[in-house]
Amino acid sequence: MQIQKFTSADAMVKYLKGLTPSDHFKIAKSVGIQPKDKADAHLYADYIVQGTSKGLSGASLVQYAEANVKRLQGIMPHLKEKHQVASVAKPTVRKVKAKAKPSVAKVTKVKFEDFTIVARPDRGGFEGWYGGRAEAFRTTKEKVEAFFFKKYSRLGPFKTVN
């Protein structure tokens, strides 16, 4: 593989970034270096291109690349090991449950038997209860009785609570 000289450091960096792993192996092998893995090939290719740009060739280029790769691996021992791209797992965020608040006693609503009519002077009328809830509100007791008769066919007797 033919390595060119560069006019600037930026041009050399752009060239190096554009190389593929197979290009790294080709560059290293072109000067007689046999890298053991992709990481080694990458380091050797970088220093070979840099040395060529400085005007080195032949044995001096090989010596320059090997010396710098060994120096770099001495400084950063993890570069000696085989590089594998590690997958990065997203950290799980545990939700902390809030402590249960002490339950407050609920105020129970007064419930009446079915067909009970309750006077509600605060609302100005009468409620008719069925199924545990106030189902009819009318202005008079007779109108509540008429509602029960119409809806449930119930004639009486109705329990009246005041």
Image (cartoon, grey):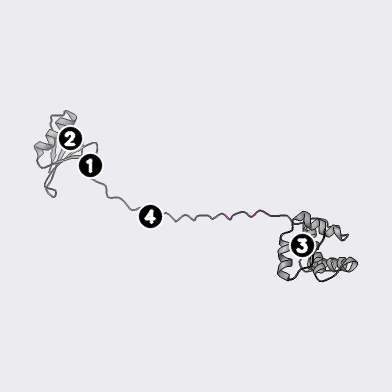
Q: From this viewpoint, which residue is outermost toward the top?
A: 153
Q: Which residue is mark 4?
A: 102
SS at badge 2: loop
- Give whichever of 41, 112 is nearer the camera: 41
Q: Quadrant of the C terminus?
A: top left
Foreground disc of the pair 3, 1: 3
Kindly indicate the quadrant of the structure image that contains residue 16.
bottom right
Q: Sequence-wise, which precedes: disc 4 or disc 3?
A: 3
Where the N terminus falls, by quadrant?
A: bottom right
The residue type indicated by label 2 comes to Phe
How far, Cα to Cα, is label 2 from label 3?
A: 87 Å
Tag 3, which secondary structure?
A: helix
Q: Which mark is residue 79?
A: 3
The spot of residue 22 in percent (x, y) is: 78, 54
Q: Tell me the CA gap for discs 4 and 3.
A: 58 Å
Q: Magenta segment, which residues?
A: 85-91
Horizontal relation, residue 12 to residue 106: left or right: right
- Reading the chain from its start, which is encountered first: label 1 or label 4? 4
Give the amino acid at mark 1. Lys
Q: Is residue 82 above or below residue 69?
A: above
Q: Nearer the viewer, mark 4 or mark 3?
A: 3
Read off the residue under disc 2: 115
Pinpoint residue 156: horizontal percent, then vertical percent: 13, 30
Residue lying at 16% horizontally and 33% vertically, measured from the top left: 148
Q: Residues within 10 Å of mark 1 (few under 14, many from 20)?
A: few
- The residue under the point 83% across, 71% down is 55
Q: Is 120 drawn above or below residue 84 in the view shown?
A: above
Q: Position of residue 154 (x, y in %)?
A: 16, 29
Viewer-side residue, 26 vs 41: 26
What number is the disc on residue 111?
1
